Amino acid sequence: MISIFWVTGILITVVIGLSLYRAVVGPGVYNRTAAVNVIGTKTIALLVIMGYYFERPYFFDIALLYAMINFISTLVFAKYLERGELWS
Amino acid sequence: MVIVNIIVTVLLAAGIFFFLVGSIGLLRFPDFYTRLHATGKCDTLGGGLVILGAIIYHFFQYPETLLVPAKLAFLVFFIFIANPTATHAIMKAAYKTGVKPWRLGEERR
């Protein structure tokens, strides 16, 4: 049953590599920000899968923190790109 | 125990399928708005399915620790709220700063 999590982790890593193309060569800053948000969501699922594969439940706390940081960073970046400043 | 393994495998495979479809849409669609249309939904559903499979696996494999499935259920709840909000925020920022939507016949960008 553990091998299912191994295969799932490998496949999620491959899909992150596919999304990384848009984050590197994507035209404009909005495409890059969207790709970084997508990669962050996939990283949350990858952290949960890694927690079951290595049998360490501390990875789930890291996944919670990463979800919050991903959400806040995307919101702050969208606000900065829209207004040109953060404190207004 | 075999039926639980089959259910978990099907849930993880469905999550990987939605992740892959979202990434292909992110790569192949011609415009910023259509790319976010592909990824904003597929990533939310794919992440929810993968973590739901992990929750079901945990219920039948380690039934003595029930705090961890509660954390994962909160994680699914947070993703289902936060990911569409982030997609909407960045799409609204792009629309307000003048990124034009793609029309049929124009060049990819």
Image (tube, coloured by chain):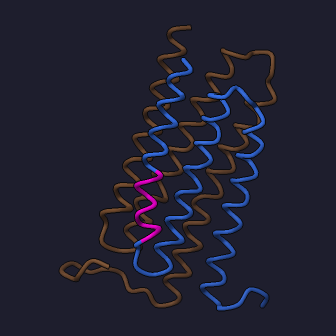
Is B93 part of what is drawn in magenta? no
x then y, percent, for residue A70: 66, 61
Left or right of B94 in this view: B28 = left
- As drawn, the residue found furthest toward the top would be B1
Determine the colour of chain B.
brown
At horizontal 80% and vertical 16% (from top left) the residue drawn is B64
Q: Quadrant of residue B25?
A: bottom left
Image quarter of the N terminus of chain B? top right
The secondary structure making up most of the magenta span is helix
At horizontal 54% and vertical 15% (from top left) the residue drawn is B4
x then y, percent, for residue A29: 50, 80
Left or right of A62 in this view: A10 = left
At horizontal 56% and vertical 21% (from top left) the residue drawn is A2
Q: Nearer the viewer, residue B22 or A47?
A: A47
Chain whose colour in the figure is blue: A
Q: Nearer the viewer, residue A7 or B32?
A: A7
x then y, percent, for residue A77: 64, 76
Q: Is residue B3 above or below residue A52?
A: above
At horizontal 51% and vertical 75% (from top left) the residue drawn is B91
What segment is highlighted magenta in the picture?
Answer: A16-24
x then y, percent, for residue B67: 81, 29
